[in-house]
Image: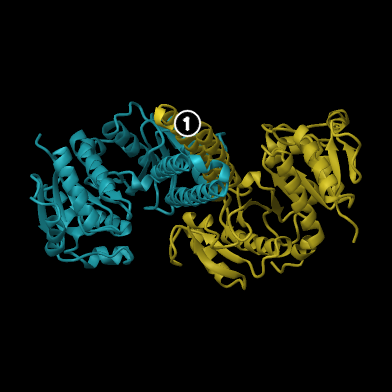
Chain colours: A cyan, B yellow
Amino acid sequence: MGEPVVALDAMGGDHAPRETVAGAVMACRQMGMRVALVGRPQDVEAELARHGALPPGLEVVAASEVIGMDEEPARAAWRKRDSSIAVGLRLLKEGRAQAFVSAGNTGAVMAAAIMYLGRIRGIERPTLAAVMPVGRPVVLLLDVGANADAKPHYLLQWAQMAAAYMERVWKVERPRVGLLNIGEEEVKGNALAQEAHRLLKGSGLNFVGNVEGKDITRGVADVVVTDGFTGNVVIKTMEGMVELMKDMARQALAGHRRNLLALPLVLPALPFLVAAGAVVAPSVLELLHRTSWREYGAGPLLGVDGLVFVAHGRSDARAIRSALRVAREAARSGMLEALRQLSV
Amino acid sequence: MGEPVVALDAMGGDHAPRETVAGAVMACRQMGMRVALVGRPQDVEAELARHGALPPGLEVVAASEVIGMDEEPARAAWRKRDSSIAVGLRLLKEGRAQAFVSAGNTGAVMAAAIMYLGRIRGIERPTLAAVMPVGRPVVLLLDVGANADAKPHYLLQWAQMAAAYMERVWKVERPRVGLLNIGEEEVKGNALAQEAHRLLKGSGLNFVGNVEGKDITRGVADVVVTDGFTGNVVIKTMEGMVELMKDMARQALAGHRRNLLALPLVLPALPFLVAAGAVVAPSVLELLHRTSWREYGAGPLLGVDGLVFVAHGRSDARAIRSALRVAREAARSGMLEALRQLSV
């Protein structure tokens, strides 16, 4: 099999096309990837010009329209047939690309993916998963917003797809599947969780039982499954906590520096203390930053008949590069074929 | 009105009776409170002996049984009629205490409270709220686990009680009420959230609309209402994030110190650097620690016909003291009478 082509929505994300184009250039130059940059040619080419000679493996595919981050998803997906999202997904459908990555309007990507690619046979509801850099090596949490209301057997299907994904793409053998719940015992939780527990228990998956909110980040399961309402609240709560902690760390360090500067005693050591502050502050902040899963690569949209990845709207070039790498890995892994053959 | 008596479950919590007794002693000595310590006399008195003369305002009320942290809640509440929880709640019922605080088995406190105190007339389901030290001055999140399955009008009743609580106990005028949801628009969310949105909008409360997971910690609402499944997942996710961040901060600081020690260049400044590390590390960790809401006082159980507060199982003496203070404030505020007069 040749090197797969990954189509990238050049226009999607808060920092597009600057960071998307930069990420694609990095992926081609550093990892020998083949990337199809989909977007408005003049915008994409203006950005490409900043990076010198066109890297081998990079091509530009024209799309005249752009779906904004705040546009109503279903309507925009339906109306803008020549958006970068629509054109990118059609490349997938036509076999001209093997995976698609977008940091754009998540709802529009989901709606357009179902519209252009359809669902895998037997899958009732496609689901969006989030990848969190907290396990061995990551934890996949799903659904994170595609289905606010869920039924127990959706959760079963999602768990099956997520396990196949972790096995193929992240090389985790017999991934441990946990059900997000509010207690460890089988009888805990709401009606949905109790019935999903029963289904998962009899599924043949490596089901490790209920997982509580505090356990997600402890990596006790490789896959954590829940409804799209709860999952979305969880990832956004995590995001809010990271922001809060960053603010607090900044304040603590600022206060610390002020105190020290006020002490004549430490004046001789001042340069060293400033240096120490400069070392501590970024390393703590960097670590806090990393826990924001959405900065980390991209989450797969599982259940549509094609490999689609949603990256965070705030993605920078490095995040885009990781997203492209994961998409290539998925294309190489034969994952889509595996999903098609799940007996769900 | 005289000084209210707050009954404290001396036997409840991971560090009981040591920390509960110490917290009660602090509350009496430092804040002039009246506290009824409920528990096994020999255990309570052994702890009290460590604190010198019995502080004025402190009395011991005997309860021969203890409900363990891991006991099945409803069964334990039903069977152990002479547990510290049951005896404490009966003090409330009999008017010998005006509020009850426990850091023990949360489910057992809820079950026993409904059993001994009953519900306020018109309230369908009592609800447990969590206090988070992140707003102005705090954010009340509810339900955090009393009702895994909820109906839209439960959320309305909970919001009404929570608003009355914030107004009376935390002196917040026209508390801003938010609905936890997965998007800002009215039509977002699952069926429960959509219908609850409609009810809250027409409620006369100061309803500020939907609040996303990342906004809870930003204090955009004083009260955030959701079902007990989602609320419980949220507080436990926050707890997990705090643990994760603490680990990361520790690792970052440890790594930092190692690097510096390896540099002969900084040897002359070593004492200062170690001092700097010692200052930065605890201040960051302390701040991280504070965000764990459950360490911060106690959450009210709203809707039972009495003032009941649930403190975190890991509460230390200081946390117990804050819980007792909040309980006294609630008793002084006339909050229970206000809840009884809500036209729900």
Q: Residue at x 33, y 26 (%)?
A: A173
Q: Give the quadrant of the C terminus of chain B.
A: bottom right
Residue nearer the viewer, B306 or A217: A217
**Chain that bears disc 1:** B
Q: Position of residue B286 (x, y in %)?
A: 59, 42
On the rendered structure, is A325 left or right of B280? Answer: left
Does residue B262 show up?
Answer: yes
Q: Position of residue B143 (x, y in %)?
A: 61, 52
Question: Which quadrant of the structure image shows residue A168?
Answer: top left
On the rendered structure, is B163 left or right of B16? Answer: left
Q: Residue at x 57, y 59 (%)?
A: B224
Q: Check the image and report above or below for A317 versus A105.
A: above
Q: Check the image and report above or below for A60 versus A158.
A: below
Q: Position of residue A45 (x, y in %)?
A: 12, 59
Name the residue tied to disc 1: B268
Q: Residue at x 47, y 41 (%)?
A: A273
